[in-house]
Image (spheres, rainbow, N blue to C red):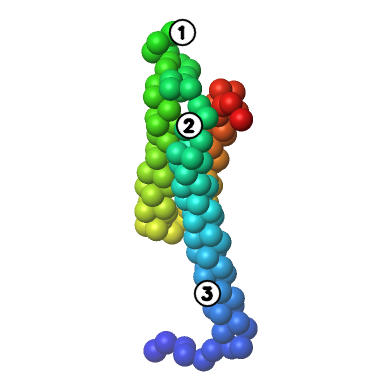
Amino acid sequence: MKNTKRFKSDIYTENSLTSKKVLIKLNFFKIVVFAVLISVANIVVVLILKDNLPPQVPLFYGLALGEEQLVSTNWLTIPSILSLSIIGINAFLSAFFENLFIKQTLVFGAFAVSLLSVITTVKIIFLLGSF
């Protein structure tokens, strides 16, 4: 027969664990939403400022010097689109894991990718833009 006697401390512990889980999920959700907003804002900024940029910009720095690095101005949205897809994949995967460390790694990794794509795009805009 199971002992069903409960102490007040057990109830407080269960409630605090539940509230911590809710707060963690809420914080992760806020970080994911912030990362999505950063990426979307980056896309909007590129589309607004494309008239102030030359028709071709260097995006693929890993390729050999010359024409291989140059792309159309509209292609500056590609880093943000890729970061949006990585945010979506990581948010989807973090929903399936129970381990808090893995969830944190996925969420903050998605945020870092979003931030790095914005930095890349902003550096190109400031380098080549005529304001």
Foreground disc of the pair 1, 2: 2
* Residue type at tag 1: Leu
Query: CA gap, disc 1 to disc 2?
Result: 25 Å
> Residue 25: x and y, percent?
50, 64
* Residue type at tag 2: Asp
Q: Which quadrant is home to the N terminus?
A: bottom left
Q: Which numbered dot is residue 51? A: 2
Quadrant of residue 81 within the rendered picture: top left
Q: Residue furthest bottom?
A: 5
Q: Is residue 19 toward the left or the right of residue 80 in the image?
A: right
Query: CA gap, disc 3 to disc 2?
Result: 51 Å
Circle nearer the N terminus (1, 2): 2
Dot 3: within a 10 Å radius of its alpha carbon, few (fewer than 14), some, or many (20 or more) residues? few
Q: Residue 39, can we see it?
A: no
Residue nearest the observer in this picture, 78 or 10: 78
Please tell me whether mark 1 sits on a helix, a strand or a loop: loop
Residue nearest the observer in this picture, 7 or 48: 48
Quadrant of residue 76 within the rendered picture: top left
Q: Residue at x 37, y 47 (%)?
A: 89
According to the picture, the residue beneath numbered tag 1 turns out to be: 65
Q: Which numbered dot is residue 18? A: 3
Q: Residue at x 47, y 44 (%)?
A: 44
* Residue type at tag 3: Thr
